[in-house]
Image (cartoon, rainbow, N blue to C red):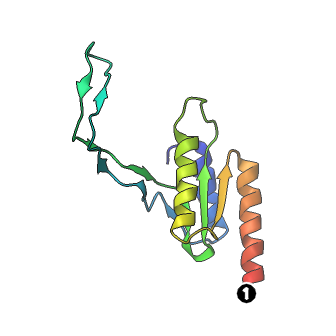
């Protein structure tokens, strides 16, 4: 696990008896493609523009921290997000992907501390009890 918050969430999910995967599935939110027009780009190491015409533009994937398939829940733990981090944009693309793939009814928890982990798990347990 990459952070203390992920470790805590993992421990609590186990304690509560949830079936889940940790970083078990990646979603391709934007597939790779080739830009057909002229594409010139700057680089850090060269003064001249680099011709990238016809080259593959890599796709964008998103891997949630925890997926609870049975409950239709995704938990993402993010303690601190730097202002120049790509996560907020990637996460918005992921939410759009879920809507477009018919998964817009899943519950998403974007968590930043242990108290929020506990609150989220309580909400998931309560929702599970109501569904029975």
Question: Is residue 65 something that shows in the picture?
Answer: no
Between residue 97 and residue 48, name the one nearer to us.
Answer: 48
Q: Quadrant of the C terminus?
A: bottom right
Looking at the image, the residue that sits furthest to the bottom is 132
Question: Where is residue 7 drawn, in percent x and y?
Answer: 57, 50
Question: Is residue 58 something that shows in the picture?
Answer: yes
Q: Kindly indicate the quadrant of the structure image that contains residue 131.
A: bottom right
**Picture residue at 52% right of the left edge, 46% below the top:** 90
**Residue 61 left/right relative to 89:** left
Tell me the SS state at disc 1.
loop
Mark count: 1
Question: Where is residue 107 drawn, in percent x and y?
Answer: 66, 65
Instruction: State the residue position of label 1.
Output: 132
Question: Where is residue 71 drawn, in percent x and y?
Answer: 63, 74
Looking at the image, the residue that sits furthest to the front is 37
Q: Kindly indicate the quadrant of the structure image that contains residue 85.
A: top right
Question: Where is residue 94 drawn, in percent x and y?
Answer: 53, 55
**Picture residue at 53% right of the left edge, 65% below the top:** 100
Between residue 71 and residue 14, name the one nearer to us.
Answer: 71
**Residue 131 left/right relative to 45:** right
**Picture residue at 61% right of the left edge, 35% below the top:** 81
Say above or below: 54 vs 71: above
Q: Kindly indicate the quadrant of the structure image that contains residue 74.
A: bottom right
For label 1, the crowd category at 10 Å Cα-Cα, with few meaning under 14, some 14 to 19 and many 20 or more, is few
Say above or below: 16 vs 6: below
**Picture residue at 61% right of the left edge, 29% below the top:** 83
**Residue 17 left/right relative to 50:** right
């Amino acid at each position: 696990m990459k952070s203390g918050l992920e470790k805590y969430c993992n421990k609590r999910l186990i304690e509560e008896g949830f079936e889940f995967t940790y970083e078990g599935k990646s979603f391709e939110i934007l597939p790779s493609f080739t830009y057909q027009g002229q594409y010139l780009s700057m680089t850090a190491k060269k003064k001249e523009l680099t011709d990238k015409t016809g080259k593959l533009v890599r796709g964008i994937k998103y891997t949630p921290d925890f997926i609870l398939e049975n409950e239709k829940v995704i938990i993402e733990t993010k303690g601190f997000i730097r202002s120049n981090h790509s996560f907020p944009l990637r996460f918005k693309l992921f939410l759009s992907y879920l809507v477009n793939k018919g998964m817009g009814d899943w519950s998403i928890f974007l968590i930043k501390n242990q108290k929020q982990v506990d609150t989220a798990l309580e909400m998931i347990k309560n929702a599970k009890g109501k569904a029975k």
